[in-house]
Amino acid sequence: MNFKRPFGKLEDRTEINEVEIGAGALRAKILTWGTVLRDLRLDGFDHPLVLGFDRLEDYANHSPFFGATAGRYANRIAYGRFPLDGRMHQLSQNTEPHHLHGGDASFGKRLWTVGSIAPDSIRLTLVSPDGEDGYPGRVMVSCTYKIVPPASLHVIYEATTNAPTLMNLAHHSYFNLDGSPDILDHTLQIEADAYTPVTQDMIPTGAVLPVQNTLFDFRETRPVRTLHEGRRIAFDTNYVLALAPRPRPVPAARLSSSRNGLSMDVLSTEPGLQFYDGYKLNVPVPGLDGRNYGVSAGLCLEPQRWPDSPNHRHFTDSTLRPGETYFQETIYRFNMA
């Protein structure tokens, strides 16, 4: 059922394509721009499972990384600076004064090359040159989307480098399982006993704290909507799943809707999971099926290394060296009640 079609052109007239893949009850549409997962549908449900757009220009002008690959380093690096092998490197400060999701040359805003297509999968590749956005080393990256019946989406990242560098990729879809205006009544469970607190500008303090007896405790299933003294708590939080990557995906989280009985299990090799409840969303243009994307229209569950890791020796290592292969596999598995 796969097909490839033009989706639009960038300002420099570069053509962006869309590829549809599917197997079992699940089908997906992926763009060659940013490896964006533009649309994800499950048989028996009449709404998209992710937030997205129908026009390329809306991605370029209004997308908060909808469905994209965040990298070369997902999440934040304080002041855009990090030490590596005794040398300090300076990156762009695209969220002044810090660096976010790979900065001005983010992989989520780049043209990728289609490496291979099958009815149930697509592999895209990208070369990031030495010095791009301040990162050392020439890296070769691949992103593979594969659908496995009955209804699982696998996202696989691999990368190599010719010089020591940082590598931390994350899939950045915003999920909404029932098509409601917001996801606050979804329930969530996260397999984490600890989290990394942050400063006011979202930079980790360096502490690793237990979630027990805090508002960050999602070890037991509870609604996303969290109130404290009558005020809603917003989440953009790194949860500690492990101290290092695992060799194969293990359970990380479960998101569920009580309205339609649909749930989504997240399994990953990654040691961290960034939970963002979309509290900053306010998209001025229509999304898929003409939907309006206001506050918390969707949420992100982003497996990754811990934010600002290179500036905290006790955090997860995000260094990639020549001869090594960066590998990440995350599974989004949908279950019908």
Image: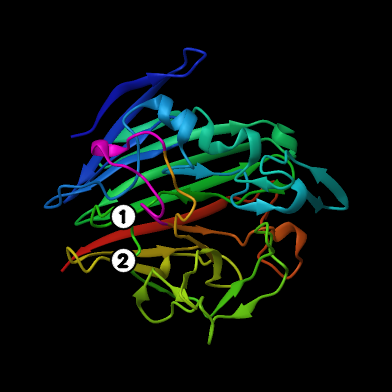
Q: Residue at x 36, y 24 (%)?
A: 17
Which portion, as a residue range, is magenta?
A: 284-299
Determine whether the residue tagged by mark 2 lies in a helix, strand or loop: loop
Report x, y in % for residue 209. Answer: 63, 79
Q: Which quadrant is home to the N terminus? A: top left
Report x, y in % for residue 254. Answer: 35, 69
Q: Which quadrant is home to the C terminus? A: bottom left
Identity of the amino acid at label 2?
His
Furthest-front residue in this view? 230
Which numbered disc flags the more N-terminal residue, 2 or 1?
A: 1
Q: Are marks 2 and 1 in contact (CB under 8 Å)?
A: yes
Q: Which mark is residue 66?
A: none
Determine whether the residue tagged by mark 1 lies in a helix, strand or loop: loop
Identity of the amino acid at label 1?
Asn
Q: CA distance from mark 2 to mark 1?
A: 8 Å
* Helix, strand or loop for the magenta stretch, by majority: loop
Question: Dot 2 corresponds to which residue?
Answer: 186
Question: Dot 1 corresponds to which residue?
Answer: 176
Position of 305 compared to 190: left or right? Answer: right
